[in-house]
Image: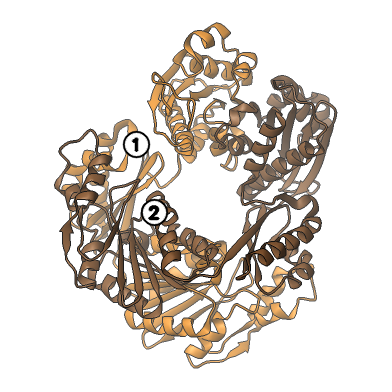
Chain colours: A orange, B brown
Amino acid sequence: MQVEILTIGDELLLGQVVDTNSAWMGAMLAKEGFRVQGITSIGDDAKTILDTLGRLMDNVDIVLITGGLGPTNDDITLQTLADFFGSKLVFDASVYADIERMFPGRPNMNALNRDQAMVPKDAIVIHNKVGTAPITWFESEGKVVVSMPGVPAEMKQVMTDEIIPRLKKRFKVPSIQHRHALVHGVGESSLAIQLKEWEGALPSFIKLAYLPQVGLVRLRLTGSLPNKTILTKSLDEAVDKLVPLLGNSLLALEDITPAEVIDRLCKQKKISLSVAESCTGGYIAHLITSQAGSSVYFKGGVVAYDNAVKCDVLNVQEKDLIKSGAVSQTVVEQMARGVRELLHTDVAVATSGIAGPTGGTDEKPVGTVWIAVATSSQVISRLFQFGTFRDRNITRASLEALAMIKEVLDQGDIISSRR
Amino acid sequence: MQVEILTIGDELLLGQVVDTNSAWMGAMLAKEGFRVQGITSIGDDAKTILDTLGRLMDNVDIVLITGGLGPTNDDITLQTLADFFGSKLVFDASVYADIERMFPGRPNMNALNRDQAMVPKDAIVIHNKVGTAPITWFESEGKVVVSMPGVPAEMKQVMTDEIIPRLKKRFKVPSIQHRHALVHGVGESSLAIQLKEWEGALPSFIKLAYLPQVGLVRLRLTGSLPNKTILTKSLDEAVDKLVPLLGNSLLALEDITPAEVIDRLCKQKKISLSVAESCTGGYIAHLITSQAGSSVYFKGGVVAYDNAVKCDVLNVQEKDLIKSGAVSQTVVEQMARGVRELLHTDVAVATSGIAGPTGGTDEKPVGTVWIAVATSSQVISRLFQFGTFRDRNITRASLEALAMIKEVLDQGDIISSRR
């Protein structure tokens, strides 16, 4: 089933807002077996909306529209849609009740809010659980046009709970299944070379997508076949063959983040965790504490940016700092041990490196990073050589630190002191 | 001058990549006096590219294309453009030299890379300083079509250094000037009400844009007038009237981030800084250390997630923790004083709050955050009530912490201990 996405709003053309809705919708539609043919962004202008909608409906079966539904005068999408389908706006009591619920403390909502309850007469109105703008579904000559709010949280809620299920009922889409693998520390092109033979041997009904981010590649296998049993078996076999090829690069066989991997492992093994960060400057702690409920296992950390902090707080030996430098195996191991003892945790991770853009030497160029993980029984440390960009070095070092924690936790010989 | 942006690539339609290029280009073009009419994303398909390009050229003077220029088979933009303009691909030695420079250690580049040096015969070829894909400029019937790489760093470099200057030479655009104000702690709609009268009194040739982010609103005044002297004077007057209206909400009169504001102030006043973070979990340290050169003033911090860390490391009194709770004025002030003494800095900031989604009570609901700033002579603290979303609470608390540091540094009575 072919889909066109239409996003409406002057703010998109002026670059005041990045259109993240379309990519989110594209990914979700692809996962469910729909195919996005094109994405168009236009301004809040009736003639442009009419012309564009007419053109898109000639091309595809489904047009999904976001934006232009706010309470202000420049939002004209619904009136324009009513004109397009030869309908007119009428007051809808259920939409008005939704809006009233959004303004609990304000019995006198303004006229603008009341206007938001005016919807095209011939549209199916879908309940907006998280906002005031109505969602409307039009059918005409076998085609479907849906208008949704541009606010990402509202659009995502209604797409997930309402629009996708209704589209799947309305149109016949192939049966689809996915498998995921989260890979760290390998670039997309190296990974592609590494997996070439395996990829070449995949059955024709299984497609592989590389979804790269800084320091990570998410692999997604999408299989499409009428026989679900064969499809499940084929996908499982493909994953079974993939796992040994990835080895230690594999972080998870699910569509989750590295911080979620650590979150689950720490909760499951009742392990407590601390961090000592030099070059990563608090970013590892931020990734961990972005997880709701991380306070169960994460005790805290020390951002030891200055060398004096490494010595005074983390008990790094000054003579080793002078002899080997802050970016060294000796110092990073002492940092990991130091924060583990200071915060009384089962496991601690430490980073020390040169994030750049300055501070590099011939011996230790920008991007040189030492990472150590300490437990009650051992300290493991590793040297990394990332690139020249500060933000990427911070991200990559933080992700590799999380991956090293996973590696140590997977060994399974850590004694939890948590009750 | 009317512009259409065309982004090409299957990965955009599948949602594997968010199109950030279009918003960046839209913002830059608006700043320079060009007007983006629409943004279209399509797949790597020759017929679709031909049809779309024809339609866009009917509407506007300038079509800017990004993407579809990689070395693999699915990238067909240049061949399609050659077909469109009735031209053909020819080998270009200067492009080949550019590509060779990108592969210094590999004398035997592969055939795919050599193919990237094939460019349409009738196009002006523009040098790509940071990548291998050629940039091409077509003119036909008074209209301009430019093809650029989809890699954001390459697109931004060539847009800034080459395309915008050439477009400004080729087309007559009005003389434009901008002023910026970075505002924190006020929502977009409240700010709009607060500034309504001032905005209404702006001369017709000055437009105001609200660019909201979580916890921040960037205001941009754009003036357009043939007489540059009057324009400068009018913009300066508008800003002079704006400043007192914003009061303490104003962080900067430039287009910079809050962390950059702190970076400049600390460097200029030779102030050293430390942080003690509970609910912000390392994010303040991350924002500060994302600035290159922050090690000059930032000594480090303590992420005191667990209460034991607050007592053991930051010297918070256990009896106060028990009596007032971790999220209290007493505790956050002790945290700020504690980290300032531990890390020997001029100024320290501390946060303690309930990021959510759980952990709230009737008295202290999710979003309750205390922030304190300590210097040698004083500790100031403030209570905030943010919302219900964990990531927004972390961001807003971190930005308010930076704003409070600025407020204290602006008072100007801090004695620097830095040499």
**Up-down: is A418 above or below B2?**
above
In the rendered view, does B56 fall on the left or right side of B199? left
Who's the residue at 65% across and 69% down the image?
B207
The label nearer to you, 2 versus 1, is: 2
Please tell me which residue is depicted at 43% across the width and 65% down the height of the picture. Answer: B169
Q: Is residue B279 visible?
A: no
Is B414 drawn above or below residue A100 in the view shown? above
Q: Is residue A171 left or right of residue A326?
A: left
Within-10-Å neighbours for mark 2: few <14, some 14–19, many 20+: some
Q: Secondary structure at mark 2?
A: helix
Looking at the image, the residue that sits furthest to the bottom is A86
Residue A300 occupies which quadrant of the picture? Answer: top right
Q: Are marks 2 and 1 on the same chain?
A: no
The residue at 16%/44% (across/down) is B110
Using residue B119 as the reference point, say whether residue B62 is left or right of it: right
Q: Residue furthest top?
A: A319
Image quadrant where residue B19 sits: bottom left
Residue B315 in the image, given as x and y percentages of width and height? 76, 22
* Camera-side residue of B356 and A395: A395
Q: Amino acid at mark 2?
A: Val
Q: Which mark is residue A250?
A: 1
Residue B339 percent location from the top left of the image: 72, 25
Residue B289 visible in the picture: yes
Q: Which residue is mark 2?
A: B158
Q: Residue A231: image x %, image y %?
A: 24, 56
Q: Which quarter of the figure has residue B329?
A: top right
Left or right, B245 with reference to A269: right
Mark pair 2, 1: CA separation = 37 Å
With respect to residue B348, does A94 lie above or below? below
Label 2 chain ID: B
